[in-house]
Image: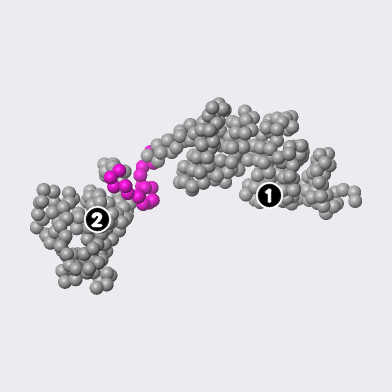
């Protein structure tokens, strides 16, 4: 008989006769219960015991001893059959959910969770729900809508824990003790992997806030290797946090003056160049939006500094890529600003002995140089 037509307790089509007993061999008056192997095969608790008999298509008697209430046990099976079952209250729903978990009855588990998500809870009932769902013995995967029902103070507690853990983790990376270098590398890898695995949005946000706070304080302390690492981690967070991080780096007047003074230092050049390049690309591609005045200020301030990094061998081959990024930002400006930037661009490149092809072509187009 097709599974879709099978009905719970129908003796004429049943090939399993279930005798349910309670603890201490307590006999239930409603025994036996007539069931179907095609339905029971869905349950791991039955499949392992009786699959050999079912393969032979023989009717069989099954004795099951359970610590659960007889009615709750049968209601769970009725739900698996697709029968409509009412939950009179949360207490009974939780009792049936406990049965369903023991039987690995996914249909019944989901039905119970859907009911719990849809009804009003008292504080006492919420405590009962939390206790059951968090039980190690059940190992339930909670439906998202049901998880969202829990009180905000619990969410805050969770976020506070994530934030504290993140602060402690970042402090391990920041520790400059050479003896901890191997541990620091492991922590860096852990953070990168964790943020790449698409964790919950609230977790990403709190991680981003911690990283950003540390990043901004590190700019003030001029720890360039740590700045670079934190920026790579910030990129794995949301776009708003990345935008704040880039602006904090590129619009800090004191920081820019520091870089101008010490541009020749090897520990400054490559990290600064790479981050400015990221900012340039993000601005040119529209991933970060800054005002016209800010775009002009950014280019006129940082182009001379970027040009000064040509002496660093690790960035020497990146100027073609830089030209493309700068050109995109320049083309987003009115012509009067483009001409102003172009003059600065040519002057910087000529002074540093950098190929002027890109700014020269633009200058010809804008007619801002004598041909």
From the viewer's perspective, tell me whether residue 365 is left or right of residue 226: right
Judging by the rendered image, the residue that carries numbered circle 2 is: 45
- Which of pointers 1 and 2 lies earlier in the amino acid sequence? 2
Residue picked out by circle 1: 284
* 47 lies left or right of 365: left
Q: Range of the magenta residues?
A: 136-153
Q: Where is residue 254 in the image (x, y as percent from the top left)?
A: 68, 30
**Relative to 97, residue 50 above or below:** below
Q: Looking at the image, is 321 positioned above or below residue 269?
A: below
Q: Position of residue 342 (x, y in %)?
A: 80, 46
Residue pictured at 47% horizontal, 42% vertical? 203
Q: Nearer the viewer, residue 299 or 132?
A: 132
CB under 8 Å between callouts 1 and 2? no
Residue toward you, 223 or 24: 24
- Quarter of the image where the N terminus is located: bottom left
Please tell me whether the stretch drawn in magenta is mainly helix, strand or loop: loop
Q: Quadrant of residue 261?
A: top right
Q: Is residue 330 one of those drawn in magenta? A: no
Q: How far apart are marks 1 and 2 (CA)?
A: 60 Å
Question: Horizontally, is 297 left or right of 238 in the view?
Answer: right
Residue at horizontal 38%, vertical 51%? Answer: 144
């Amino acid at each position: 008989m097709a599974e879709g037509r099978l009905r719970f307790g129908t003796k004429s089509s049943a090939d399993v006769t279930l005798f349910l007993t309670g603890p201490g061999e307590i006999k239930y008056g409603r025994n036996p219960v007539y069931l179907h192997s095609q339905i029971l095969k869905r349950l791991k608790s039955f499949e392992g015991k009786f699959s050999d008999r079912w393969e032979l298509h023989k009717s069989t008697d099954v004795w099951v001893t359970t610590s659960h209430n007889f009615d709750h046990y049968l209601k769970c099976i009725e739900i698996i059959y697709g029968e409509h079952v009412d939950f009179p209250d949360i207490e009974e729903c939780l009792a049936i959910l406990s049965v369903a978990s023991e039987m690995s009855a996914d249909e019944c588990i989901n039905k119970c969770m859907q009911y719990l998500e849809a009804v009003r809870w008292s504080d006492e009932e919420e405590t009962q729900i939390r206790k059951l769902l968090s039980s190690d013995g059940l190992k339930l995967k909670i439906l998202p809508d049901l998880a969202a029902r829990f009180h905000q103070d619990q969410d805050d507690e969770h976020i506070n824990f994530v934030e504290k853990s993140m602060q402690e983790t970042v402090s391990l990376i920041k520790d400059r003790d050479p003896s901890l270098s191997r541990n620091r590398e492991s922590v860096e890898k852990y953070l990168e992997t964790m943020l790449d695995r698409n964790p919950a949005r609230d977790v990403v946000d709190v991680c981003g806030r911690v990283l950003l706070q540390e990043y901004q304080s590190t700019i003030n302390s001029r720890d360039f290797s740590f700045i670079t690492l934190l920026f790579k981690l910030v990129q794995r967070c949301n776009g708003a946090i990345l935008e704040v991080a880039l602006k904090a780096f590129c619009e800090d007047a004191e920081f820019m003056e520091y870089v101008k003074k010490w541009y020749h230092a090897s520990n400054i050049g490559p990290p600064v160049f790479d981050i400015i390049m990221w900012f340039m690309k993000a601005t040119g591609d529209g991933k970060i939006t800054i005002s016209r005045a800010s775009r002009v200020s950014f280019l006129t301030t940082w182009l001379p500094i970027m040009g000064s990094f040509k002496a660093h061998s690790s960035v020497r081959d990146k100027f073609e890529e830089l030209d493309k990024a700068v050109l995109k930002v320049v083309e987003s400006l009115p012509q009067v600003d483009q001409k102003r930037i172009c003059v600065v661009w040519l002057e910087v490149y000529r002074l540093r002995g950098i190929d002027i092809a890109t700014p020269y072509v633009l200058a010809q187009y804008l007619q801002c140089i004598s041909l």
